[in-house]
Amino acid sequence: MDTSFVAKKKFGQHFLHDKSIINKIVAHSCLNENDKILEIGPGKGSLTKILVKSKANIIALEIDNDLINGPLKIFDDYPNVQIIESDANNLSPEITNLLGNSYKLISNLPYNSGTHILTSLLTSPYPPKTSVIMLQKEVANNICGRDNKLGFLGAFFQSFATTKNLFTVRPTSFRPPPKVMSSVIKIELLDNPLINLEQLESYKSFLYAGFSAPRKQLHNSLSNGLDITMSYSKTLLSMAEINPTIRPEKLSVNEWVSLFRKFIETQKS
Ligand code: SAM
């Protein structure tokens, strides 16, 4: 592995060198040569090199020009790989067109902006059907749920996708090693989402309000976040048949969706 490149903190650069982890990510991606893959942040190309073997069509977006003109040059010779200099937070219409409406996202995402990149891709008009991604372990737990607790991101993503925690990865698998543990997760879009694309933004704001005071009882958190009276908050919870004294993270995605529907209904009437 090329060690001359100095990792940039501002781009969340922690390069994977552990081949067994890379192989596991690729195995969980179930690739075939007809697949189109979006890789965000190929870095020095350690995951890309294994993805290439599947013969799938790979579009890799990298923000760091020094990587594009350095270690990633090796992919110039591969007809099935396109390395594009781009900020994944702002996909241009050309890249959206290249991706089309059926592609897989396979990435070791940067820690500092991974959640934002993932959220904007998954809520775009053409989201990846399947994503196999590495994130900070806490974020992965928030998305997939753990110990009968579901975080804000989980209640959001699971309204239109299934999420699965695949395995955790130790800091020693990266150079430089991050200070935190990582996890690889799989997200697959539901054929019949509980919340459709048009309502996603308002559902997200509703959840944001619901999780505004996560340590408080749900009726308090809801009334705080939505700026509604305690009695309205209790009425909503009673309509959705949810215990008002539990904490927000104890609700299932179905309960959040049902509560959201009651809120919309009562706002109309
Ligand atoms: N995939 C490589 C690996 O596993 O070794 C690198 C992973 S490193 C955690 C994250 C990569 O994302 C870096 O190469 C970084 O430069 C790139 N990156 C950070 N922010 C980005 C953004 N907004 N758009 C595209 N790439 C970005």
Image (tube, rainbow, N blue to C red):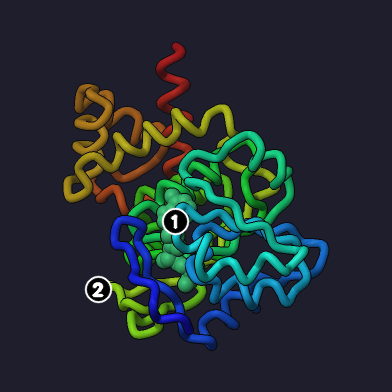
Residue drawn at 78 percent across, 70 percent down? 55
Give the CA distance from mark 2 to mark 1.
Answer: 22 Å
Q: Dot 2: within a 10 Å radius of its alpha carbon, few (fewer than 14), some, or many (20 or more) residues?
A: few
x and y percentages locating residue 122 in the rendered image: 55, 45
Q: Are marks 2 and 1 in contact (CB under 8 Å)?
A: no
Q: Which mark is residue 64?
A: 1
Decide if residue 254 is in sight here: no
In terms of image quadrants, where is residue 47?
A: bottom right
x and y percentages locating residue 84 in the rendered image: 59, 52
Residue drawn at 73 percent across, 77 percent down? 53
Which of 163 and 246 lies nearest the eye of the viewer?
Answer: 163
Q: Which mark is residue 101?
A: none
Which amino acid type corresponds to the residue marked 1 in the rendered image?
Asp
Q: Quadrant of ligand 1?
A: bottom left
Which of 82 and 99 lies nearest the eye of the viewer?
Answer: 82
Q: Quadrant of the C terminus?
A: top left
Residue picked out by circle 2: 179
Q: Mark 2 or mark 1, which has the lower sequence index?
A: 1
Which of 56 and 186 lies nearest the eye of the viewer?
Answer: 56
Q: Dot 1: within a 10 Å radius of its alpha carbon, few (fewer than 14), some, or many (20 or more) residues?
A: some
- Element assignment for label 2: loop
- Element assignment for label 1: loop
**Cβ(mark 1) to ligand 1 < 8 Å?**
yes
* Left or right: 249 in relation to 168: left
